[in-house]
Structures are given as structure tokens and as C-alpha cells.
């Protein structure tokens, strides 16, 4: 087999790759995005496949494959999802760290996101907070707080009202100067001159509790994310449309922003963040003014973002019941520190 991955549609070879590990399958995903080819019509030949590769094939919609060297751990995945498979040689285990990290408790979607992060195919940037102390007036709000998130990871920070959750987000944005400690977004120190030039890397979705009737359309709100860019009106319109389509709100473009529901406004706010190409998203009590339907919409949208752009996301909230539906790691903010 001269290529590491060969994909046929009938008798025609439509895709090949010579890359290693899982990269050929991610390349196949990119290829299929621009083609009107049902994955069920494809026959995939792979040199080596373990449990991780099997999860990716299932996620891609592949239904038939041939693997030259197949790990026994891939077989239950293929069988559980009706994938027809054959192999040249069967081994108990492939010597790959990733093979051990894909657990039986992971869904296909969970495994897919995990593998995307390991492959570096996420938009998010790492966030590192070290020994952060923040005072408001004479009161200490955050004390010697440290936190580290990898690229494309998500975190929920919960805690009672008044514990400093919003203060933490505003400090991450550079709006509040800490007494001590450092914050790094990617390779940039928050508060530095370089940070001020790249502040758009962080998007902020705040609580939607402002009631006014200032005449502004949904698409104009989304375009605020491009306000500091020197772009033509045509380019702005294109970027706004792409961002609003990604967040499922383009049909609201011409409507008055203030006439929209809470869930619809959340989608517009996220479109604004995508317009500015934010690679870290901060959510401040995003469900506070949403009804049950709006909360379901937000949950769906967060899951969509996790599996598409995969930015690094931090959500703060005091609503623990709603958070049970969001399968993200959690930390409690208490006494100025994360527990």
C-alpha cells in the first residue's frame, strides 16, 4: 500500500494521504467539507488503525473500510456502529499513547474532540493564570489564584453570587489590573502593549440584562467585532454572514437586536466573537436571563462550538442544575481561589 490512506468512491480514487498517525483522517474530513459526497459511498483503506482511528471513521460517517494492521480495540467501535471492516493483520494493541487515552466511557463526539485537541486542530489558545491577586477598593476578591487551560479546552467556574466570578473574567480581559500575578493568553501577557494590540483574541459574552431601544440590527451588533479592522464594507458583510451562519442566526440579520429573545441575543453575541476571530471565549452567567428554551439553545450552541471551531472556553455561573447538562470540567470559586 503506497499511501497511508486511500479513499475510493466506486472505482475512482478520490483522496489519498501520506501523513502519519490520525492526520490522514483529519485531512479527509477537510476534503469532504468541500465536496458533495455522502460518506456512506466511500471505501477507506488505512495502513494502521486502532480505537482512535475507528472513532474518527465513525464520526466521519464511514461505513466500509479495510485496514492492513488493525488493533483489536477498534473492533467493538466498528461493530457498535455498523461499520463493515476487513483487515490484513490483527494485533492486540497498537503501541500508541492515544490508544490508551480513548476510554470506553467516551462517546464518539467526546473522542473526536479529544483527538482534535491532541492533533492541534483547534482554534483555541492556552490560558495560564499564576498567583493572581485582585483587590476591589480595600477588599480582596481573588487571592493567589492559579489556573491553566490547554488549547481548545473548556471549563465551568461556579460559585455563589459575589465570589468574584465576573471580576476574574474582567481581569482576563485586561479591564482590571491585578495587585500581583500574571495572565498569559497564548504567548501574550495580558496588560502588555502586545496585548492591547491583540485584545480581540478574547471574546466576551456578558449577561444580557440591558433593556433599551437603541436602533441597531442584529447584523450591526455582530459587526462590532470588526470595528477595529480596516476592511471594506463588502468584506465586513461577508465575514458577518459567515459568523452568523455558523451560530445559526443569519435569518435574524435585519431584525432589531432589542426585539430578539435571550437565546437569539446569545447567538448574535457569539457571532460577534467569531467575527473578531476570538480564540478564547468568556461567558459571564450566560443563562441568567434565559428561559428553559433559551438555555437549551445555548447548550446546543456551546456543543456546536466545541466540535467545530473549538475555541478555549470559560463559563462562569451560579446555576449548578443547568450545568449538569454541560459535560465540561468544573472548578468552584470560593474564598478567592479555585477549588
Image (cartoon, rainbow, N blue to C red):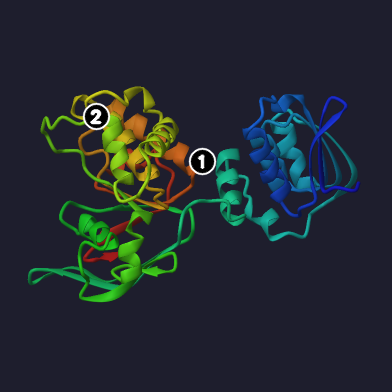
Q: Which mark is residue 217?
A: 2
What is the CA distance from the residue labelled 2 to the residue labelled 1?
26 Å
Q: Nearer the viewer, residue 217 or 72?
A: 217
Instruction: Give coordinates of residue 315: x percent, y percent.
Output: 33, 49
Which residue was labeled with disc 1? 308
Q: Assign a secondary structure to mark 2.
A: loop
Q: Residue furthest front?
A: 232
Picture mark count: 2
Q: Is residue 49 left or right of residue 149?
A: right
Q: Quadrant of residue 211?
A: top left
Instruction: Give coordinates of residue 252: x percent, y percent.
Output: 32, 24
Residue mark closest to the camera, 2 vs 1 = 2
Regarding residue 182, the answer to whether it shows in the image is: yes
Q: Quadrant of residue 60?
A: top right
| Above or below for 221 versus 100 | above
Q: Residue furthest bottom?
A: 180
Amino acid at each position: 500500500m503506497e499511501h497511508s490512506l486511500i479513499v475510493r468512491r466506486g472505482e475512482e480514487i478520490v483522496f489519498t494521504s501520506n501523513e502519519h498517525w490520525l492526520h490522514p483522517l483529519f485531512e479527509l474530513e477537510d476534503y469532504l467539507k468541500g465536496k458533495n459526497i455522502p460518506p456512506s459511498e466511500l471505501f477507506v483503506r488505512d495502513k494502521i488503525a486502532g480505537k482512535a482511528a475507528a472513532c474518527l471513521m465513525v464520526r466521519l460517517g464511514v461505513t466500509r473500510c479495510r485496514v492492513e494492521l488493525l488493533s483489536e480495540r477498534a473492533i467493538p467501535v466498528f461493530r457498535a456502529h455498523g461499520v463493515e471492516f476487513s483487515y490484513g493483520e490483527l494485533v492486540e494493541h497498537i503501541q500508541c499513547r492515544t490508544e490508551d487515552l480513548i476510554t470506553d466511557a467516551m462517546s464518539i463526539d467526546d473522542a473526536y474532540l479529544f483527538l482534535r485537541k491532541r492533533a492541534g486542530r483547534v482554534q483555541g489558545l492556552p490560558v495560564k493564570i499564576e498567583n493572581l491577586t485582585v483587590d476591589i477598593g480595600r477588599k480582596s476578591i481573588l487571592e493567589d489564584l492559579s489556573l491553566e487551560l490547554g488549547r481548545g479546552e473548556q471549563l465551568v467556574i461556579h460559585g455563589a453570587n459575589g465570589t468574584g466570578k465576573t471580576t476574574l473574567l474582567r481581569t482576563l480581559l485586561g479591564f482590571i489590573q491585578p495587585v500581583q500575578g500574571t495572565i498569559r493568553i497564548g504567548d501574550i501577557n495580558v496588560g502588555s502593549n502586545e496585548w492591547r494590540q491583540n485584545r480581540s483574541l478574547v471574546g466576551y459574552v456578558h449577561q444580557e440584562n440591558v433593556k433599551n431601544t437603541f436602533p441597531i440590527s442584529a447584523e450591526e451588533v455582530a459587526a462590532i467585532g470588526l470595528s477595529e479592522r480596516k476592511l471594506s464594507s463588502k468584506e465586513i458583510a461577508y465575514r458577518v454572514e459567515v459568523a452568523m451562519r455558523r451560530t445559526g442566526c443569519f435569518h435574524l440579520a435585519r431584525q432589531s437586536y432589542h426585539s430578539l429573545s435571550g437565546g437569539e441575543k446569545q447567538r448574535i453575541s457569539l457571532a460577534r466573537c467569531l467575527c473578531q476571530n476570538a480564540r478564547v471565549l468568556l461567558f459571564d452567567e450566560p443563562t441568567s436571563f434565559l428561559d428553559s428554551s433559551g438555555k437549551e439553545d445555548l447548550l446546543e450552541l456551546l456543543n456546536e462550538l466545541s466540535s467545530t471551531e473549538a475555541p478555549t472556553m470559560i463559563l462562569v455561573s451560579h446555576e449548578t442544575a443547568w450545568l449538569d447538562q454541560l459535560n465540561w470540567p468544573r472548578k468552584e470559586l470560593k474564598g478567592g481561589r479555585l477549588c
